[in-house]
Image (cartoon, rainbow, N blue to C red):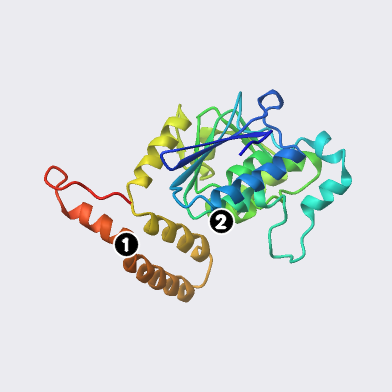
Amino acid sequence: MHFETLSLEITEDIAYVALARPEKHNAINATMFIEIVQVIKHLKSVKTLRAVIVSGQGEGFSSGLDVKSVLQSPKLAAKFLAKWLPWHSNKAQQLCTGWRELKVPVIMALHGRCWGGGLQIALGGDFRIATPSASLSIMEGKWGLIPDMGGTLAMREVLNQDVAKEMAMTAKVIDGTEAHRVGLVTHISDDPMAFAKSMAKTITEQSPDAVAAVKKLYNKSWWSSPGLALARESWYQIKVILGKNYKIKAYNQTHDESKHKPFKF
């Protein structure tokens, strides 16, 4: 697929998506809105996919919304915000929630600016790896707005409420080290992409059925009732055990690789 504001490469069942407007600090314009939704839809159709790594080209991950570009067309902006059912994601929110809907883990490799809408995209990942000097901010407050691109789902999972409120109300900027301390990022690394690749490789060595089930289980159950969480846990485990990938993983785990060639998923 060809994109104007993104790049996509799939190598060894790992998809590498990069925000590709480096001359604009990867600011999110109307085209990028559309193309992120398109690339997520495409990745859902890749049956052999095992992990996704999202990064930004140039000096940073994303400086947030390209306000001038998006507001040039009020009709288009309204289209991004419109929804038929209030509890479903609109086009803008899909920049975050779409990554959560993928069955495979999504790793965000962050450097430089990760502001506003850029942070909302990053919050859609299952993991966020940032440089110590990365710059993160819920920047919408500077424009008199609230963060409304779906990141609230992830923020309630990773941040204490008072920390999230302070960041959103003040639009304060924190570095990667502070973001890691408060739980906004998963790991700190001088080379987030290398770290993300290593993590993705480790994940591809596990059963894809188990990985997908864990993502679905935790995303659905983290804030649900204890009863529903236990029910999902039992049901997803039954589905995993009945699949072939459980048997492959169990065989590989119990047989010496020097004597028995391991099976591939």
Do the CB atoms of the residues marked 1 and 2 lie less than 8 Å apart? no
Is 15 in front, or is 48?
48
Position of residue 258 in the picture relative to residue 108 (left or right): left
* Residue at the spot 76% in from the left edge and 35% down from the top edge: 66
Position of residue 179 in the picture relative to residue 150 (left or right): left
Residue 77 in the image: state x and y as whole percent: 82, 47
- Mark 1 lies on a secondary structure that is helix
Q: Is residue 18 visible?
A: yes
- Mark 2 lies on a secondary structure that is helix
Query: How busy is the neighbourhood of tag 2: few (under 14 within 10 Å), some, or many (20 plus)?
Result: some
Residue 252 in the image: state x and y as whole percent: 22, 52
Residue 148 in the image: state x and y as whole percent: 72, 51
- Report which residue position mark 1 lands on: 244
What amino acid is found at the position of numbered circle 1 in the picture? Lys
Q: Is residue 162 visible?
A: no
- Quadrant for residue 29, please give it: top right
- Quadrant for residue 110, please give it: top right
Residue 209 in the image: state x and y as whole percent: 39, 59
- Report which residue position mark 2 lands on: 101
* Residue with the most extreme front position: 1
Quadrant including the N terminus: top right
Report the Cα–Cα distance between label 1 and label 2: 23 Å
Task: Mark 1 or mark 2: name the one nearer the start of the chain.
Answer: 2
Is 160 in front, or is 68?
68
Q: Is residue 80 above or below residue 116?
A: below
